[in-house]
Amino acid sequence: MNKNTHMVFKTIRKYVILFLGTVIAAAALEFFLIPNNIIDGGIVGISIITSYLTNIPLGVFTFALNIPFLIFGYKQIGRTFVLSSLFSIISFSIWVSIFHPIPGLTEDVLLAAVFGGVILGIGVGLIIRHGGSLDGTEIVAIVLSKRIVFSVGQIVMFFNIFILSSAGIVFGWDRAMYSLLAYFIAFKVIDITIEGLNEAKAAMIVTANGADISAAIRDRLGRGVTIMEGKGGFTLKDTTILYSVITRLEVSKLKGIVSDNDENAFVTISDVYDIMGGRNNKKNIH
C-alpha cells in the first residue's frame, strides 16, 4: 500500500469513527438526558436550554451556535481541527433531529443521568480522540489558555458552571444537580475513551542499583528501560536514573521490583498521554 492510499484509508477511518461518535452522543442526549430535563455542558447545554424555551429543534441551535466558534477557530487553530469539528457538529445536529421523536428509554432521573453520562462520554471521547469537537467553547478555551494563566480544562469548567447554573433556573435545581452528575460521569468516561483503560504510566527511578532494577524490569515486566547517569544534588554522589513506560496495572509490580533491589530508591510515577516510537508504543503498552 503506497503512502497516498494509506492516507486515504486513514482519513476515511477517522471520519467513520467521528460519525459513529456523533450517533452515540446524540443517542445519549435524546434517549436519556433531554427527556428528563438533564443537560450537558458547553454549546450543547446552551442549545438544550434555548431549544426548550423556544421549541426550535435542538439540531438548529447546536449547528448555528457553533458556527462563530468554528470561524474563530479556523483563524486561530487550523483547518484540520475545524473541518473535523464541522463534520462532527453537522452529523450530530442531524442525528439529534432524527432521534428526537423517539421516546426516552427511562423516566428514572438517576438512571438517565448515569447511563446518559456514560454513553455521552463514549461518543464525545471518540470524537475528541480522532481530532473533532462538538463544543465551540473548547476552541475558545484552547486559544485563551495561551494568553492567560488558566488551563483549557479550567476555562471550560468556568463556562459549564454558568451553563449548569442556568439549567437550575430553567429546569429546577434538582435537574441542575443531576446535570452536574451526568457531566462528571461523561467527563471521566471521555478520559477513559481517549486514553484507554490500561493508560500508560512513566516511571522515573533514581537508584544506586540501576543494573539489577533495570534487568528485573526487562525480565519480569517485559518493558524497555532507558538508563541515564546522574549526580545527587545534596550528596554530589554519582547515581543511576532509570526511565520506563508501563501500564497502570504494572505499577504495583514495579514498586515491588524497586523495593526488593533498593529500599532507598527515589521513584516518581506520572501519567503518559501519548506514545510514539520505540518499544513502548501504544500497541506494545497494552
Image (cartoon, rainbow, N blue to C red):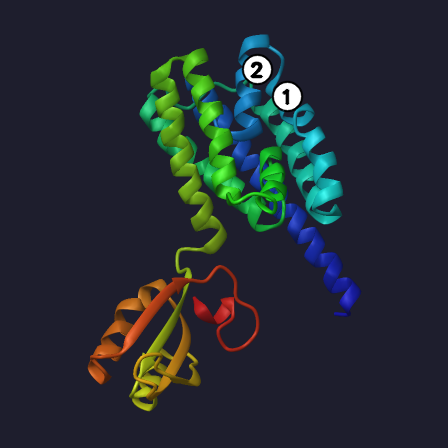
Residue 257 image position (x, y, % from top left)? 26, 79
| Label drawn at residue 50 | 2
Residue 161 image position (x, y, % from top left)? 44, 28
Residue 155 image position (x, y, % from top left)? 51, 37
The secondary element bearing badge 1 is classed as helix
Q: Which amino acid type is shown beneath numbered disc 2? A: Thr
Does 103 appear above or below 203?
Answer: above
- Sequence-wise, the earlier of marks 1 and 2 is 2
Give the residue displayed 65% in from the left and 51% down from the top.
14
Residue 109 at least partly seen: yes
Please tell me how crowded label 2 is: few (under 14), some (14-19), or many (20+) other residues with Cα within 10 Å: some
The residues bearing labels 1 and 2 have C-alpha atoms spaced at a distance of 8 Å
Residue at the disc numbered 1: 61
Q: Quadrant of residue 89?
A: top right
Give the residue displayed 62% in from the left and 37% down from the top.
140
Residue 57 image position (x, y, % from top left)? 62, 16
Give the residue displayed 33% in from the left and 21% down from the top.
108
Nearer-the-camera pick, 85 or 34: 85
Nearer-the-camera pick, 274 or 265: 265
